[in-house]
Amino acid sequence: MSELANRPSEVAALLSRHDIWRGRQQTPPAGTHPPCPSGWSALDEILGGGWPRQGLVELYSGSATRAAPRPIDHLGTDPLQRYQGWFQDSLGFGALEVLLPLLRKQAAERGVALLNPPARLCAERWQAEGVALDRLLLIAPNNLRELGWATEEVLQSGVYPLVVAWLPPLGFALRRRLKLAAETSGGCLVTPYPLGAEMAAGTPTAPSSPAWAQLIVHRHAQTLSVRRIKPFHPREVHLELDAGGAHATSLDETGITPLTLVGAR
């Protein structure tokens, strides 16, 4: 170790690798593209400037009514209906709404991919929110293996700068694989997860993950509260929603209907 420390160029090369994460790194690694503003200055502050242009972000929201299932280390041919309750537990709690400005921006510029949405999207509502429908790619896999394969393929294509995928509770190795796919292709992968009972305590414990950031989101009447739990940020921010504008009602609640996609399972 001491011999390596005497060669700063080699240390710098090592730390610049996409699969190296510095323990309390708040901002995207040096050399990556500037972050994308979130639409709220308070949220940008705890994100280190905004959403990353590449990498993995995990959003946790929900009522914390059940413990998280055991992490999956292998994606087999298990049907996705087995996890339908898990996928839907985060709906209606602000996970999509906190992404809305980013969804608008990326859909307008290049496009957004949505994988395994656990409910039917309301096209009229998304259009009213300013999201370009002709720039949305919807993928409804049949089983876990197809879901993992499709997520990785969309990321590696480099076509969509923003990919939102509803995934089962993955083990560390699978999360790392998707994180590397996002970073090497220059895209941002966002994975909404339900807030498990073990994360609802005063000091929530996040699942082990190589994600660039893990956030807890709660929706209230006219605000969103957001905490960054990895890397830890001491401040919880409260994001004001427009009283009569695009943020007046939850995109999660009125933008999708909690039912299984027809022909998707």
Image (spheres, rainbow, N blue to C red):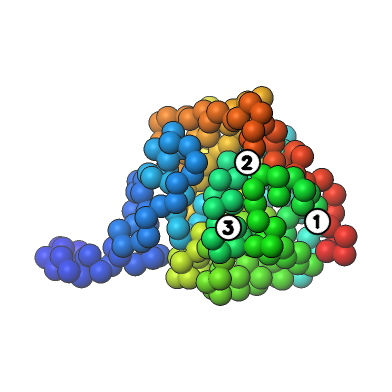
Q: Residues within 10 Å of mark 1 (few under 14, many from 20)?
A: few
Could you give the CA–CA distance between mark 2 and mark 1, rounded to whole angstroms? Answer: 26 Å
- Left or right: residue 29 versus residue 259 is left
Residues at discs 3 and 2 in contact (Cβ within 8 Å): no
State the image coordinates of residue 95 (x, y, percent, origin top left).
62, 42
Tag nearer the camera, 1 or 3: 3
**Three-letter code, disc 3:** Ala
Residue receiving disc 3? 108
Helix, strand or loop status at disc 2: helix
The reply to whether residue 254 is visible in this rendering is yes
Identify the mark nearer the N-term, 2 or 1. 1
Residue receiving disc 2? 97
Helix, strand or loop status at disc 3: helix
Quarter of the figure that contains the C terminus: bottom right
State the image coordinates of residue 219 (x, y, percent, origin top left).
64, 31
Tag nearer the camera, 2 or 1: 2
- Compared with residue 83, is residue 31 higher up or lower down, i.e. above or below? below
Residue receiving disc 1? 82
Residue at 87% across, 64% down: 263
Could you give the CA–CA distance between mark 3 and mark 2, rounded to whole angstroms? Answer: 17 Å
